[in-house]
């Protein structure tokens, strides 16, 4: 199975988008941008975000009418027919999206396409779950399969998040229902499973034939790291143990392995920070900052540090001061880090800079003898330059 879109159009759209970013940074001129758009035409209908939102809302109203008509036709058909009708309606919606909207009308993340996609997913999931009397396992497995298909086939980010969430829910529910020791090791199961998911995704992300799923894999990486941290966070483990597993604690008593979860609450964020700095991984850096903030909240939740208004004021002033110092310190690139927009990283897999340069800068003599420095520290020159960064 492959994605539903024309690869040439996907490739050309990526070139045009990145070229516009280069243009906005002053790295290429308007006439060069026009040359790129002519050299790499894209027939996709892909409007801006405002138009997409409006089209999504309009399509939602239209599909509501179609759903109402569907309900009138099958509303009195009985519980044996309705689940099958929902499933067939969902499959037909997928077929219409694939054959008509994408293949014929060239819609790519147009707002209408997303609306029909989520509509199809909803009816397919409801139909299959209804056939199994809404068994929890069937619901979770159906969600995982349908959302994974939608994410892979249509390069959709929301269904990617839904798929990884469905997998997490299935994993948790399986261990929870098993009871006994399996309930107690849920945090460690999550740490091992989603740590492995992160490592595997990171390994596959650099492969050229998977370049069109790079944003989907970034979503998987982010959620996996957040779940690894949450699984070891003391507050999350304690509160879930009390509310879901009916753990009763008397005053002064702590959860099992409390020392380990205290340690993980502190170690994991700084381990992510170290990985982000060492490997120049912006995603790990951002997740580590979120984790550090939640670690502070965790300890503040159980241990008071004086008046909350004083604590918040001091913490805010400290964070603001650190941010200001870093902002000034990174005016110039230091150790591969800069406060400026880093354009080179997104180009690593697509190798777009080679043909942007070859198709545009070679024809502009005013820049042919001048090398332009990119955010990643690399340089490119005129028509005879290489594609190195």
Image (cartoon, rainbow, N blue to C red):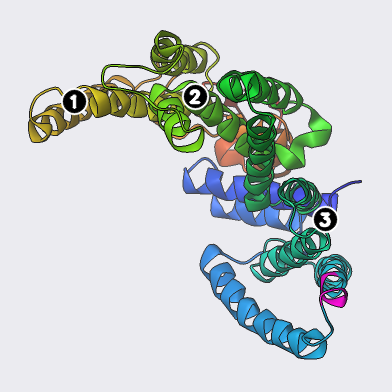
Is residue 123 depicted above or below 235 in this figure? below
Q: What numbered label is drawn on residue 321?
A: 1
Of the 4 image quadrants, the one containing the C terminus is top right
Q: Give the range drawn in magenta.
A: 79-83
Label 2 to label 1: alpha-carbon separation:
26 Å
Residue 70 picture quarter: bottom right
Q: What numbered label is drawn on residue 252?
A: none
Q: Is residue 253 magenta?
A: no
**What secondary structure is found at the residue carrying circle 2?**
helix
User: Which residue in the protein does label 3 denote?
Assistant: 5
Mark 3–mark 1 contact, CB under 8 Å? no
Numbered label tally: 3
The picture places residue 77, in percent across and down from the top left corner, at 84, 84
First of labels 3, 1 by sequence position = 3
The picture places residue 79, in percent across and down from the top left corner, at 81, 75
Label 3 to label 1: alpha-carbon separation:
47 Å
Q: Is residue 82 magenta?
A: yes
Neighbourhood count class around disc 3 (C-alpha, 10 Å): few under 14, some 14–19, many 20 upward: some
Q: Which of 255 and 339 is in front in this view?
A: 255
- At horizontal 54% and vertical 22% (from top left) the residue drawn is 281
**What secondary structure is found at the residue carrying circle 3?**
loop
The picture places residue 262, in percent across and down from the top left corner, at 38, 14
Q: Which of marks 2 and 1 is in front?
A: 2
- At horizontal 73% and vertical 35% (from top left) the residue drawn is 350
Mark 2–mark 1 contact, CB under 8 Å? no
First of labels 2, 3 by sequence position = 3
User: Which residue in the protein does label 2 denote?
Assistant: 229
């Amino acid at each position: 199975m492959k994605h539903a879109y024309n690869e040439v159009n996907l490739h050309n759209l990526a070139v045009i988008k990145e070229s516009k970013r280069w243009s906005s940074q002053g790295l290429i001129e308007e006439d060069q941008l026009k040359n790129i758009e002519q050299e790499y035409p894209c027939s996709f209908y892909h409007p801006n975000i405002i138009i997409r939102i409006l089209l999504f809302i309009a399509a939602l109203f239209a599909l509501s009418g179609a759903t109402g008509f569907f309900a009138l036709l099958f509303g009195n058909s009985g519980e044996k027919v309705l689940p099958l009708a929902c499933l067939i309606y969902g499959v037909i919606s997928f077929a219409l999206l694939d054959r008509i909207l994408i293949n014929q009308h060239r819609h790519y993340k147009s707002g209408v396409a997303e609306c029909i996609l989520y509509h199809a997913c909803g009816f397919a999931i409801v139909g299959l779950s209804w056939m199994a009397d809404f068994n929890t396992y069937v619901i979770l497995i159906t969600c995982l399969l349908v959302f994974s298909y939608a994410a892979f086939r249509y390069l959709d980010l929301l269904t990617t998040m839904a798929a990884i969430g469905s997998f997490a829910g299935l994993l948790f529910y399986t261990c929870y229902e098993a009871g006994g020791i399996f309930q107690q090791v849920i945090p460690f199961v999550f740490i091992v499973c989603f740590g492995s998911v992160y490592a595997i995704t990171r390994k596959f992300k650099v492969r050229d034939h998977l370049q069109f799923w790079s944003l989907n894999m970034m979503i998987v990486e982010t959620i996996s790291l957040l779940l690894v941290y949450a699984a070891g966070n003391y507050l999350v483990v304690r509160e879930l143990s009390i509310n879901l597993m009916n753990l009763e604690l008397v005053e002064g008593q702590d959860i099992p392995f409390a020392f380990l979860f205290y340690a993980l609450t502190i170690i994991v964020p700084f381990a992510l920070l170290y990985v982000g700095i060492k490997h120049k991984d912006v995603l790990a850096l951002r997740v580590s900052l979120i984790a550090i903030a939640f670690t502070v909240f965790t300890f503040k939740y159980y241990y008071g540090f004086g008046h909350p208004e004083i604590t918040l004021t001091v913490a805010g002033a400290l964070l603001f001061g650190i941010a200001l110092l870093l902002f000034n310190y990174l005016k110039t690139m230091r150790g591969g880090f800069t406060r400026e927009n880093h354009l080179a990283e997104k180009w690593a897999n697509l190798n777009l800079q080679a043909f942007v340069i070859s198709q545009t800068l070679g024809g502009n003599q005013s820049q042919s003898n001048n090398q332009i420095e990119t955010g990643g520290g690399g340089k490119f020159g005129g028509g005879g330059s290489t594609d190195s960064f």
